[in-house]
């Protein structure tokens, strides 16, 4: 299968929320069935059964046995169903073998620093797909980038496999690798967050901002808004109570939609009158500003349609 065919297969499931509309990604403890099932109520667009840091080694076998049931429940709820396995050099191969029959939508691989790690995971997934008769290329890969070396290689990592649809930025591990004190303001992660987003955009995959790893909702909202100001449209979380805040920040507000509509109308009227740009109060509207407003309106419409579809699935169940 060619790279183009594989990427098409990975994205052809019309019931799966497209990567660009996955605003919120929640890590849930991999071996806690009640927590995994309860996570469906928090409103996350994507849920991640976490078999690495959130699951002690002695509980991983039991956690893998839960995966098929959990993945099916999450998918039925209209949620993108993911598993974070351990590094392949550790328990990752056993994790993958134990969960893949449940057909997770995406596999998260932690501690990614080299594109070859992504290639190795792609090869293992392909082997299991062939063994189990699963649709080839349907399982996505989301590299979790948690070191300085990984940040420097984001573009190479993001383009190492057609399965890669997103990359996720770390918080605690990255701060530790940078030998930087961890802070609520996350100043120690500022450059890494900017660089990961830039390289992900260049690779044309979704960039997922790092989780806010403190409990206070005010700090989470501020951190999400800081990420949005950098260009992120998605953020991960380790606390279910943070998901509603993230969804709000990553969804165009009514005021933003109204402003974008005014910008589009003013620019199109100016162009119809033969002018190269438009004015709206003190704002000079040129082509990039117009295109940005159009993207915001398209995103707002797509998210609205997605919410209606999810509501419909819930009603059917």
Image: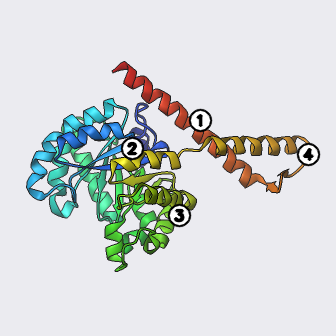
Q: Residue at x 41, y 31 (%)?
A: 15
Image spot of residue 95 (x, y percent): 17, 51
Compare marks 1 and 4 and give the one earlier in the sequence.
4
State left or right for residue 309 relative to residue 288.
Answer: left
Q: Residue 144: which quarter of the image?
A: bottom left
Location of mark 2 (residue):
6
Say how the picture is coloured.
Answer: rainbow
Q: Residue at x 10, y 49 (%)?
A: 61
Along the line of sight, the residue nearer the viewer: 223 or 61? 223
Image spot of residue 18 (x, y percent): 46, 40
Along the line of sight, the residue nearer the viewer: 226 or 6? 226
Q: Are marks 2 and 4 in contact (CB under 8 Å)?
A: no
State left or right for residue 47 relative to residue 14.
Answer: left
State left or right for residue 262 relative to residue 227.
Answer: right
Instruction: Say whether residue 23 is visible.
Output: no
Location of mark 4 (residue):
274
Compare marks 3 and 1 and give the one earlier in the sequence.
3
Instruction: Say whether residue 223 is visible.
Output: yes
Whether 140 is drawn above or below 173: the answer is: above
Location of mark 3 (residue):
198
Between the residue at mark 2 and the residue at mark 4, the CA separation in whole angstroms equals 45 Å
Between the residue at mark 3 and the residue at mark 4, the CA separation in whole angstroms equals 35 Å
Location of mark 1 (residue):
301
Image spot of residue 173 (x, y percent): 31, 69
Which numbered mark, 2 or 4, is in the foreground of this view?
Answer: 4
Compare marks 2 and 1 and give the one earlier in the sequence.
2
């Amino acid at each position: 299968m060619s790279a183009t065919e594989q990427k098409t297969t990975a994205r052809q499931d019309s019931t799966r929320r497209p990567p660009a509309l996955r605003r919120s990604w929640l890590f849930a403890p991999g071996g806690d069935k009640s927590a995994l099932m309860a996570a469906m109520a928090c409103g996350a667009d994507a849920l991640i059964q976490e078999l690495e840091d959130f699951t002690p080694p002695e509980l991983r076998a039991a956690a893998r046995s839960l995966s098929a049931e959990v993945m099916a429940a999450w998918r039925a709820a209209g949620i993108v169903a993911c598993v974070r396995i351990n590094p392949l050099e550790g328990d990752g191969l056993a994790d993958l073998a134990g969960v893949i029959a449940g057909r997770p939508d995406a596999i998260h691989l932690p501690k990614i620093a080299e594109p070859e790690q992504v290639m190795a995971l792609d090869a293992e997934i392909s082997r299991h797909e062939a063994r189990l008769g699963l649709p080839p290329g349907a399982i996505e890969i989301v590299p979790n980038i948690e070191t300085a070396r990984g940040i420097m290689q984001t573009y190479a990592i993001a383009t190492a496999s057609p399965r890669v649809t997103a990359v996720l930025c770390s918080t605690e591990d990255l701060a530790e690798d940078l030998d930087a004190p961890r802070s609520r303001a996350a100043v120690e992660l500022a450059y890494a967050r900017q660089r990961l987003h830039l390289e992900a955009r260049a690779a044309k995959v979704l960039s997922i901002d790092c989780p806010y790893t403190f409990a206070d909702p005010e700090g989470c909202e501020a951190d999400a808004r800081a990420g949005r100001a950098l260009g992120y449209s998605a953020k991960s979380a380790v606390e279910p109570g943070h998901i509603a805040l993230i969804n709000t920040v990553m969804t165009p507000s009514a005021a933003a939609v109204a402003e974008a509509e005014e910008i589009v109308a003013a620019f199109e009227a100016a162009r119809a009158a033969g002018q190269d740009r438009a004015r709206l109060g003190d704002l000079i509207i040129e082509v990039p500003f117009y295109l940005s407003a159009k993207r915001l309106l398209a995103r707002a419409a797509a998210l609205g349609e997605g919410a209606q579809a999810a509501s419909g699935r819930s009603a059917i169940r």
